[in-house]
Image (tube, rainbow, N blue to C red):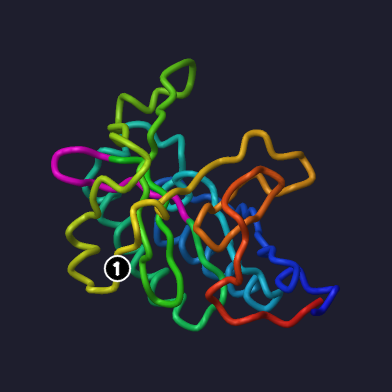
Amino acid sequence: MNFHSAYDQGFARVAACTTQVHLADPASNVAGIIETVRELNDRGVAIAVFPELCLTGYNIDDLLLQDVVLDAALSAIETLRAASVDMLPVIVVGAPLRQGNRLYNCAVVVHRGRILGVVPKSYLPNYREFYEKRHFAAAADRTTTGVPSRLWRTGRIRRIPPRSRSVQTCCSAPSTSPGWCFTWNFARTCGCPCRPAQRPPWPEPPSS
């Protein structure tokens, strides 16, 4: 066992990322995300988590209901998927996605050229400047309620077991640890009691 490798200790290296946001411009936003992930790839990061609605910007109000913005968000996801083929990190980004006649505030999980899952937000704030219920529907539970058909048609989404579909914010995590935890069976990324860590399914990055 390499004492200096977090991966040998059963942990995953997680990056909580922020990039410059271009409001209602998913193409520009995904370009910045890809640039950041390439840098994280060189640093051996296993999971790169980006902010809520990072592909469109959070505070664009009723622009979230515009077809041109929603279509551009789907195109940005496809751009990210294609760019992730040769990159190590599991990438989590936020995007508004339509399913049926509803709009969801989603976390999209991408890895190695595949969209692993889409997780809609369950608990929507509805106070002060946070009036998400004006635009979004809440997920019925903590698993996926469906994936937009345009993403399914790419043939690059892998179905994963229902108990593994969860993207959570660890509110109880100490300030010195990442604020997000990706609770797949193999990951333990902060101090909260998530699932026991197992060996990650991606290649080991260089130890540092």
Kind of residue at disc 1? Ile
* Callout 1 secondary element: loop
Q: State whether the magenta stretch is mostly helix, strand or loop.
A: strand
In this rendering, would 171 be left or right of 134? right
Q: Which residue is mark 1?
A: 157
Residue under the image location 65 percent in, 80 percent down: 204
* Vertical arrangement, residue 70 with respect to residue 142, above or below: below
- The image quadrant where one finds the N terminus is bottom right
Query: Could you tell me how many numbered marks the image carries?
Result: 1
Is residue 24 shown in magenta? no
Picture coordinates of residue 102 (x, y %)?
20, 38
Picture coordinates of residue 120 (x, y %)?
35, 43
- The image quadrant where one finds the C terminus is bottom right
Residue under the image location 14 percent in, 39 percent down: 101
Task: Write the start and end of the magenta stretch as one range.
Answer: 93-103
Picture coordinates of residue 70 (x, y %)?
27, 50
* Vertical arrangement, residue 193 with respect to residue 25, above or below: above
Closer to us: 29 or 85: 85
Badge 1 density bin: few <14, some 14–19, many ≥20, Cα 10 Å: some
Picture coordinates of residue 152 (x, y %)?
21, 65
Residue under the image location 47 percent in, 55 percent down: 93
In this rendering, would 115 be left or right of 174? left
Closer to us: 175 or 18: 175
Most extreme residue toward the right, as rendered? Answer: 3
In terms of image quadrants, where is residue 66? top left
* Vertical arrangement, residue 174 with respect to residue 12, above or below: above
Most extreme residue toward the top, as rendered? Answer: 128
Residue under the image location 63 percent in, 34 percent down: 171
Is residue 102 shown in magenta? yes
